[in-house]
Amino acid sequence: MEHQASLQLTSSGADYSAHQKIGLAFIGVGLLALLITFLGEGALNPTVTLALSLAGLLTGSGILFARMLHQPAGVNNNGVWFSGATARGMAGWILGIVFTGFYILLYWTPSNLEQLIRGTDALSYAIRGSAADQWFLYGLFYTLAVLVMGIRMLIKYRDNRYQILRTISVMFFQLGLAFLIPNLMVLLNQPEFYFSYFWPLKYDYLWPSTFSSLTQGPGLGIFLLFWTAVMTVIATPVLTYFFGKRWYCSWVCGCGGLAETAGDPFRHLSDKSARAWKIERWMVHSVLVFVIVTTLMLWGNQWMGGGLLGGMSQEFSRWYGFFIGLIFAGVIGVGFYPVMGSRVWCRFGCPMAAVLGLLQKYFSRFRITTNGGQCISCGNCSTYCEMGIDVRWYAQRGQNIVRASCVGCGMCATVCPRGVLRLENGPLEARYNGPVLIHHDDMSVQLDETWKQSRPLMPPVQEDLPILTDDDL
Amino acid sequence: MARHIVIIGNGITGITAARFIRKLSDDRVTVVSSETDHFYARTALMYIYMGHMRYQETKPYEDHFWSRNRINLVRGYATQIDPGQKVVRIADGNDIAYDALLLATGSQSNKFGWPGQDLLGVQGLYGMQDLTLMERNTRNIAHAVVVGGGLIGIEMAEMLHARQIPVTFLVRENSYMDYLLPKEESALINREIAEHGIDLRLNTELKSIRGRKTAEAVETSQNERIECQFVGLTAGVHPNIDLAKASGIDTNRGIVVNEFFETSLPDIYAAGDCAEFNADGIGSRRIEQLWYTGRAHGKVVAKTLCGHRTPYQKGVFFNSAKFFTMEYQTYGDVPAQSEPHIRSRLFQSGRKLLRINSDRESGRVLGFNAMGVRLRQDQCEAWIRSGTSIKNVLASLGKARFDAEFYSNAVYRQAAAV
């Protein structure tokens, strides 16, 4: 098609309304103030310029979002593949580089972010009782991104109660459990603890170092250990059995929360090929093995008083923290949103997702069902699956979708124009159904034996997914 | 000895047939298409124009699927069939020999001889070439007119609207699609069209299209002149029978076939949109032009092509559509006009509508219409097949719900209160 994503920043052909121009102007002022804070060397008071920046960004976003309210409610992905920002055009690559660059500065040279950090001091003193560091700045930006883009989600999907509740949930967990409470705990002289993260995503929560610091530290340490153990060992499998991994990945988790809000404009960029699925399975399970081995080595070493392979376990944990915790989860996971979609980390790297996925696949009531023969193979479901599941492949043959990676965001069912997909928690029997396109019975015939013998039956058509063969014969 | 089965047309019928032939036999399979290199979902054409998807997202199978399953794809235009020599002639000069041939050539847009219908900027919408043309024809235009109140017409209006092109939508009927939909359903769609800012002109037909080389305006049956640079002609489609006709195969409106999809010539079959069942065929509708019927035809004809002659039988009718943001599903018998033997119960709450028809005498359930709510096809079909009483259906309607979790249950509450 001629209409391709190019150098444009936004959709082509569309004239900007006065409304949009005002919104964009505010965002421009906000970005400028952010740049001044970042580069200003403190010439201007960073608290003032950062506050100005946030005010500009929030007001501008608000104005742009308000415009969405004037359009009728309903799925609207118009121009997603035309806009440079959302279709890997130049704007998309610039965004990706800016996000990635921010993570690199944050992890390796936070001194470059000094003025931005100082700009958040006032807030940090108020809720944490101490000066800000780069992690406070990061937490603040992260939470604001989830909240602001969460509001966009609430408007965009305002006629879909599943999407509304799910978005409110991730906004709540990010703001409360991943930002305010950990900081308030510091203010109250307690350990900085994240109630919504568990091992193996928060890998060090089951490492001996955390155990010793919590048991020897002040106040709530024992309770926090108890919480971690209960959530990891009991709540995770039980909740996943009843609801699938979505209870965590698209309702609670902070990584998921950012993907579902700030990442929503990029969800269609995930790779749907069978090859990508293969890579995904190798990678995510390798990371899971890596974290399990590291954790076991650390404990073994602890019990043996450092006798297990010397400092090897420490090396392992350092490498895990560096490659998986920093590079994968942060730099690639978020930095690559505009290039590889919003769930790169969740799909290829997150060991928590791997555990939840195994539980979901083999020990859960959750599945996505398809509605008889109503699928028209249009491809909206696959396109907007952030996890890169080729949903259509199942839907067009009337087969339930039971996939380890599905985070249950419900977007396939939301964008389906024919009401074909439904997220369900149901009994385990017949959860894996075969291809059962409706009218299957009318059109299937009992082949008589002589015909079968005269014509050797070929193996079923290879359709890439080694799950079930087509039993249509 | 493996035979060679050649299929003309890589739409849903041709491709479904090819896939099932491969499942059933070791015969060689070749699919010829002049439209695209690979099978794509025609139903998704609108989404490409609107920017929801690109062409590659509309392909239901990855490109390597075809060679891996030994389904040979040929890009070319079949001009003639030589039934004596059993050869299909392709426009580039190559001949393809066949043992069995399936024509799945689909449809073409109707043109009713309107003055100006061949001007530049005037077109229908059926295939990929139409979409490319529409892309070119709608560049930097100020106003568009869409003619014809069917599914493609409303899709075209939505497409243009998504590109912020103002649209006037000429519909012959009193109310959108009132020839297929009862008046409440039709009224909901009228409202939906208006809410999206489309200038809907009911009771209005196209008289002529004006312009020197390109379209400049249309004149309507109301003697109005509407300035426009693009005219979408979407007054239905008809079977594409050019190839069959040129090759001496019996045709009427479509390529004439029996219930085994056999044409008048041996070893030549036709299925999908292009086929017309002969008098001995089945059911009242002799030409079936839905995605779903195309898929069903392809599956059945594959069995016949593989040597197991199988008649086509219709199941309980179903269809679905989406009119702007309004989803629609229908199961069984829901005529537009009320009929004496049918009792129709309507439950409506705002933009959500549920209609259940039953037999006035026996109370057996006959059909469902759902708008803005989703119903489970296998449940509705099971009720209709078994002739379940309307009383029992209303009492257990929850079993048929297919809405997303937490969805409004207003219409179901109404139904349960009956």
Image (cartoon, rainbow, N blue to C red):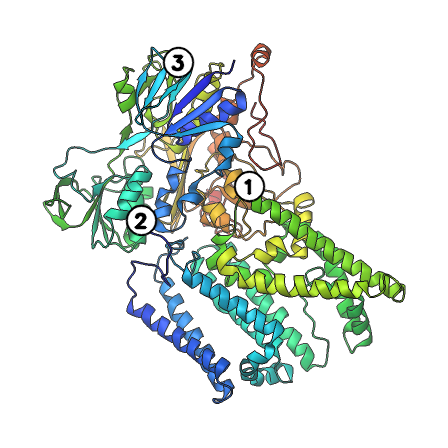
Residue B269 image position (x, y, % from top left): 38, 18
> What secondary structure is marked by label 1?
strand
Disc 3 marks which amino acid?
Answer: Asp
Disc 2 marks which amino acid?
Answer: Glu
User: Dot 2 surroundings within 10 Å: few (below 14), some, or many (20 or more)?
Assistant: many
User: Which of the two labelled residues, at mark 3 and mark 2, occupies the earlier sequence position?
Assistant: 2
Q: Quadrant of residue B319?
A: top left
Answer with left or right where residue A194 lies relative to residue B265. right
Q: Is residue A250 visible?
A: no
Do residues under tags 3 and 1 come within 8 Å of each other at their CB atoms? no
Disc 1 marks which amino acid?
Answer: Thr
**Which residue is labeled 2 in the image?**
B158
**Which residue is labeled 1 in the image?**
A369
Judge whether B268 appears above or below A152 on screen. Answer: above
Taking depth in this image into account, of B390 and A352 the one nearest to the observer is A352
> What secondary structure is marked by label 3?
loop
Residue A174 image position (x, y, % from top left): 59, 67
